[in-house]
Image (tube, grey):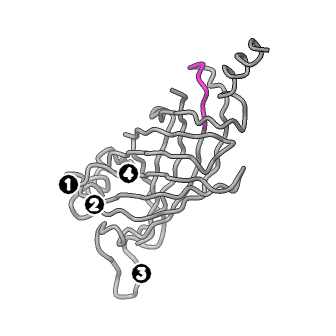
Amino acid sequence: MKKASLILLLFTPFIPGSVYSQSYTVDAGHTAITSKVMRFGVIPVLGRFNDVSGSISYNPGSPENTSATITIKTGSYVANNVDGEEAVMSDAFLNVASHPEMIFEVTKLVGKGEGLMATGTLTLHGTTKEVSIPVSITGPMMDLPTRKQSIGIVGSLTINRLDYGVGQEMKLPTGLEIIGNDVVIEFYVLALAD
C-alpha cells in the first residue's frame, strides 16, 4: 500500500486535472508577437517583435490559477521597412529609448477548451491597463526536440494606441485615418516546462 501511495505521489503532477501547476519558460525561437495597424485605410502594416521572454504557471485542470508574465522588447520591432521601423520606434510612437519594454501580465484564465479568456494587464509606453484576451491553449504535450513538456498559446488583442499615449490621432481632412488608432496584437507562444 505504501509503495502504491508513493508511486501515486510521484506521478500526480503529470495527471490531467491535478492540483499542481507546471512552470514554463517562453521559447523565444518559436514564439511570435505581431502587430497590425491600418495605413491610409488601404492595407494593414504588419510588424513583429523578435525579442520576447516570459514565464507561465499553468494547470489545465485549474486554469483559474494561471499566471504569466510576457516581456517584449519594443526595440526589436521589425516590419520589412526600415523607414517604417524607425518611425514606430521613435519618440513619436513607441519611444523605445524611454519605454524599452511592453509587458503582459496574466492573473487568471476563465473558461475551458477553446473558450478561454485571459485577464490581466498590459503595460505599454508607460501606461498600464486591464485587458482581457481570448486565447486557445494546446497541450501540455511532449516537445520532441527538447524532450520537455510544452504548451502552445494563441491569442489576439485589439487596443486603441491613443489609450496608451502611443502617437497622436492622425487624420486627413476627409476623416480618413493616416495611421489607424486600433492596433491588433497577436500572440503565438511556445513555452517549455522548467
Q: CA distance from mark 3 to mark 1?
A: 30 Å
Q: CA distance from mark 1 to mark 2?
A: 9 Å
Disc 4 and disc 3 in contact, CB within 8 angstroms: no
| Residue 147 on the magenta span | yes
Q: Which of the numbered marks, if any, corresponds to residue 128?
A: none
Q: Earlier in the sequence, mark 3 or mark 1?
A: 1
The answer to whether 103 appears left or right of 114 in the picture is left
Q: CA distance from mark 4 to mark 3?
A: 31 Å
Q: Which of the numbered marks, if any, corresponds to residue 126?
A: 2
Q: CA distance from mark 2 to mark 4?
A: 10 Å
Q: Which of the numbered marks, if any, corresponds to residue 176?
A: 3
How many badges with numbers are in the image? Answer: 4
Q: Amino acid at mark 3?
A: Leu
- Mark 1 or mark 2, which is nearer to you? 2
Mark 1, residues whose alpha carbon is within 10 Å: few (<14), some, or many (≥20)?
few
Dot 1: element: loop
Which residue lies at the image location 32% right of the left edge and 76% below the top edge?
Answer: 170
Start and end of the magenta stretch?
146-151
Q: Amino acid at mark 1?
A: Ser
Q: Earlier in the sequence, mark 4 or mark 3?
A: 4
Above-or-below relation of 154 to 146: below
Q: Earlier in the sequence, mark 4 or mark 1?
A: 1
- Mark 4 or mark 3, which is nearer to you? 4
Q: Position of residue 157 (x, y in %)?
A: 52, 60
- Mark 4 or mark 1, which is nearer to you? 4
Q: Amino acid at mark 4?
A: Ile
Residue at numbered disc 4: 103
Dot 3: element: loop
Disc 2 and disc 4 in contact, CB within 8 angstroms: no
Residue at numbered disc 1: 98
Dot 2: element: loop
Residue 92, picture quadrant: bottom left
